[in-house]
Image: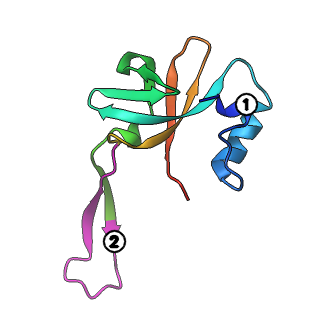
Amino acid sequence: MEPICEGSDLIKGDPYSEMVKALCANDSGTLFRFGTVVSADPLTLNVGGLTIKTDEIYVNEYLTSTAREAKVLLPESMILEPEGEITFTDPLKAGDRVLCHSDKDQVFTILCKVVKA
């Protein structure tokens, strides 16, 4: 698979593609590529046919955590307990597609999960 900056993987109308095009216009040896999570623990990616292991990967912490807490307050609610907490979970898992950035040293940063529209 070619690097995204070379044009083959850009998806017309996709806002992430527009972001990548803008960043690629100022190319300084960095690449943006799509990858697939092979394993979540330990985190392993397949990027362009290469296996990338945990020590070469940085990732947004929201993609690794299994829980996020949020306080909920519903003052006008008829619910008996109008205050509480809710937990959101959506960590990376095998098969997830991700948008990655890599530098000249082949260190990869997972920017976000991506899905086909």
Between label 2 and label 1, give the one nearer the viewer.
Answer: 1
* Residue of label 2: 73
Q: Classify 76 as above or below 101.
A: below
> Does label 2 or label 1 sit earlier along the sequence?
1
The residue lying at 28 percent from left, 48 percent from top is 67
Q: Residue 90, position in %: x, y? A: 34, 50
The residue lying at 65 percent from left, 40 percent from top is 9
C-alpha gap between disc 2 and disc 1: 48 Å
The residue lying at 32 percent from left, 62 percent from top is 71
In the picture provided, is 81 more to the left or to the right than 23? Answer: left
Q: Amino acid at mark 1?
A: Glu
Q: Secondary structure at mark 2?
A: strand
Q: Residue 114, position in %: x, y? A: 51, 47
Circle on res. 74: none
Neighbour tally class for label 1: few under 14, some 14-19, many 20 plus, Cα within 10 Å? few
Whether residue 60 is visible: no
The residue lying at 42 percent from left, 21 percent from top is 52
Q: Residue 48, position in %: x, y? A: 53, 27
Q: Between 76 and 54, which is closer to the camera in this rendering?
A: 54
- Does residue 79 belong to the magenta stretch? yes
Q: Classify 59 as above or below 115.
A: above
**Residue reaching furthest to the top:** 105
Q: Classify 48 as above or below 87.
A: above
* Residue of label 1: 6
- Quadrant location of the N terminus in the rendered image: top right
> Which residues make up the magenta segment?
72-91
- Quadrant location of the C terminus in the rendered image: bottom right
Q: Secondary structure at mark 1?
A: helix
